[in-house]
Structure formats: C-alpha cells, structure tokens
Amino acid sequence: MAFKQADDDRIAQLLNVANWLAAPIGSTEYMLRKFGVEGQHFEWDGDTPVKTALGSNETTVPFEYVTDAAPILGPRDKARVDAQRAFQETAVPRVLRDPSIGLYSNTAVDNAGELAEIIKAAELDIVSGRKGIEAWDEAVDAWRAAGGDAIRAEFEAAVDTASPSPSESA
C-alpha cells in the first residue's frame, strides 16, 4: 500500500485506518468488516459465521484492495482446507519476495493503466492467435518505453535510499 505524500497527522490517520482494516481473524474489527453485525448481517452455524441476505448485500465493500488481515485456510470443508494447506506447503518455499514491496514509484502509479493495457493487449493477441509469441518481445519493449524502465530506475533509487550501507548494518 502506498500513501500520497502528506503531513504527519494525515499519514498517521491513514495508517490507523489501514491498521483497523488489517485486524486479525477473530477480532471484533475483523468480524465487523468481513461479516457485519451479528443478528443482522450474519448468524452463527456452529463455529461458522453465515451471512444473511442483508449481509450478502451490505458487507461486500472490497476493503481487501486497500489492505487485509493475513489470509487463512477455512472455514471450509476439511478436505478442501487440507488440499489448500498441502499446496501451500509445496508452493510457499518456492515463492520469491517482490523486492518492490514497501517502495514507491511515481511512474508506476501515474502510468499503471497504460502499462497494464500494453501487456493485456499483447496477451490477448497471442492467446487468440492474432499474433505469434514473438509479439511478446515487442510488447515488453513498448512497456519499457512507456514507463517500465522509469519504474525500474525509481525502484532502484528507492532501494539505494532505503538500504543501509555495509558499515551501518554491521
């Protein structure tokens, strides 16, 4: 998540909102955000909250696109949860951390739609057979020229600024 540059009070306010949105499973904040008000938006079926019709309509604001609690497995059918866990135990050790997380690029924010469109159009052209796989190289060149290289430079500068020198980390 990135916030536009603002005074300290505004940033503190935004961080408080993000903190509330990221409240962990089982907390009052999590239950209110995900399920609404008990008796009005959801009822309990054993240990599982089940949304009412009103809850399905009134608790669908996609706050998770701002920030969210850590994902969980469940509540679902035990076989499904076990299959998800087995997949994650295999996949997670292979995941690479995105080095741009926590960094900011003006170009990435300002040109996100245009850059995404370049890639989506190329994918569609290739998958639908209008163009061959060689069109991907052209799309990457267009993406880089439209801002991809600038994004990389901004992220590299942000890494250099954020990283302690070897003498500082010792």
Image (cartoon, helix red, strand yellow):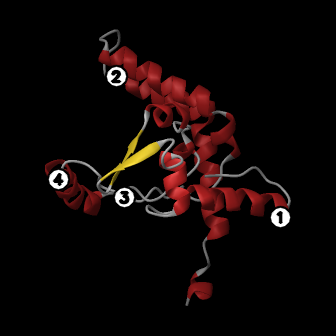
Q: Does residue 166 lie above or below 9 as drawn?
A: below
Front of the two marks 2 and 3: 3
Amino acid at dot 1: Asp
Query: Residue 113 location in percent, x, y?
Result: 60, 28
Q: Does residue 102 lie above or below 110 as drawn?
A: below
Q: Residue at x 51, y 42 (%)?
A: 40
The residue singled out by tag 3 in the image is 96
Of residues 97 and 31, the one nearer the viewer is 31
Query: Residue 147 location in percent, x, y?
Result: 62, 35
* Disc 2 to disc 3, C-alpha distance: 27 Å
Which structural element holds mark 2?
Answer: loop
Q: Residue at x 50, y 33 (%)?
A: 54
Front of the two marks 1 and 3: 1
Q: Are marks 4 and 1 in contact (CB under 8 Å)?
A: no
* Disc 4 to disc 1, C-alpha distance: 46 Å
Front of the two marks 1 and 2: 1
Q: Is residue 79 left or right of residue 68?
A: left
The residue singled out by tag 4 in the image is 78
The residue singled out by tag 2 in the image is 134
Per the rendering, the mark at residue 8 is 1
Query: Residue 62 location in percent, x, y?
Result: 54, 39
Q: Are marks 4 and 2 in contact (CB under 8 Å)?
A: no
Quarter of the image where one finds residue 9? bottom right
Q: Earlier in the sequence, mark 4 or mark 2?
A: 4
Which structural element holds mark 1?
Answer: helix
